[in-house]
Image: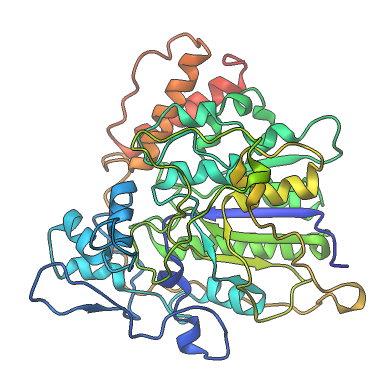
Amino acid sequence: MPTQIQNLVVLMLENRSFDHMLGFLKYEDPTISINGLTGNETNFPAKELMPDVPVSKDAGDVQDLNPDPNHDFDDVTAQIFSNGITQPADMKGFVRNYFEACNDPLHAENVMKCFTPETLPILSTLAKEYAVCDRWFSSIPGSTIPNRLYVHGASSVGSVNQDAVAAPFMLKTIYESFTDQTPFDYRIYTNGASILLANNFLMRNQHKFFDYETSFEDDATRGNLPAYTFIEPRYDDDGQGNFANSQHPDFPIDRGEALISEVYSILRHSPKWNSTLFVILYDEHGGTYDHVIPPTLKPLPQNGGLPPLAPAKNGFDFTRLGVRVPAVFISPCIKPNTVINDRDFEHSSVVATVRKLFCPGTQPLSWREAQANTFENLLVLTGNDIRTDTVDLPDPVISQPVAINAAAEVRKPTDLSVLMAQAMQFSLKQRGVPGSANPPDLTTAAKVSSFLQNTQNLVKSGAAQ
């Protein structure tokens, strides 16, 4: 039997596709049997009469993807179906769609730029030294928030874009399945913000949120991590010397690499390391290129008794998955150079695996969760075969000089940060918190960060209970 996972730790980063991050693993080392890049993949050009645009091995730490590529539902559909959704998917529309955002035909070609093991050494090393999955897809062909809701609740409450501020509040999550009847527990470690803080259930359970910077290392090294740990990166600069490490374009990739390395090192020195599985995921592809056509799902008859998924306003039925994203599994019970390509995963797989491991006998949240493949059997090494080697990670690489960004005190906040603030405001209104009806000033990254911190403190003080 595989080693039982006693501690599952998930770190979800931002907006990068599989090919963009790990596609050239295969090109650099043909013995790695992933469905990666050959170097011959192309996209249609931004304008007619221009040549097709090939993939390239020169992705930069920053500057390539400014402005941010489009990744709302209609944009992702255009990227997957270059000639319209009535035609077969061809994954040829990424450059054309980015041209709509940047209005520069040459800059639009940057969505075809990809990293290599030399320019993305930490994630690449972990993928080779442990296990990489080349069939993990974002849950919907849309943006960050709905995909992040899927990793917690196997649903997005009908949302396919970043415009549904009510969805985080209404979502029923896997955390509600951790009850007094199960001996297991969970924690959420944040770096200053989380869409989960706006969730109705979790607003009443703020004691489950912990600050990553001050708590995670101590909890892990003391063996105090719960059965399930979810880690959120820092989504934006806060104006107080803390910088975004989510890897969302156009924040520096190397800061996210440093976060990955830090979490790995902390877990590697945990007394529970031999029964820990560390999973690195990305919420969606962020408009960057991938060549694999996403699958289409069909509800199975045996799952017809589960609650139906809320319909999307545009008629989307949530049967079509989004673009492929990186997924790396790390444990001393996993053989080096493992490639998982015998089944498809999506973010509902996290919910399904957590339920199977730690909330057995409880009801799935949706047909998507009920049908999702799980990964609880990946720890194949047991007993004396459990690895004792130390994988030394290289330093992060800054692949080109980092531009000096405007300070958070004056810089426009990210769309994601604003959405989180709006969702928090909506949730506070639902709970009748005095003063929450006044719209916050969301004009700078620092002001949004301050608002999120203040509202979190308000909830923790009990005002929103």
Which residue appears farthest toward the bottom when viewing the image?
30
> Is the residue 103 above or below the residue 303 in the image?
below
Q: Position of residue 437 (x, y in %)?
A: 39, 13
At 63% from the left and 72% from the top, the residue drawn is 342
Residue 226: x %, y % from top left: 77, 45
Look at the picture and state if 20 lies above or below 431: below
Which residue is at the front of the view, 123 or 285? 285
* Total numbered circles: 0
Q: Is residue 377 left or right of residue 297?
A: right
User: Looking at the figure, which quarter contains the N terminus?
Assistant: bottom right
- Residue 462's image quarter? top right
Name the outermost residue toward the front. 301
Left or right of 58? Residue 304 is: right
Q: Give residue 324's position: percent from left, percent from top.
A: 46, 63
Position of residue 332 relative to residue 181, above or below, is below
Give x and y (percent) for residue 215.
68, 44
Instruction: Tell me what residue is drawn at x 65 percent, y 66 percent.
Output: 329
The image quadrant that residue 438 belongs to is: top left
Q: Is residue 243 above or below residue 308?
A: below
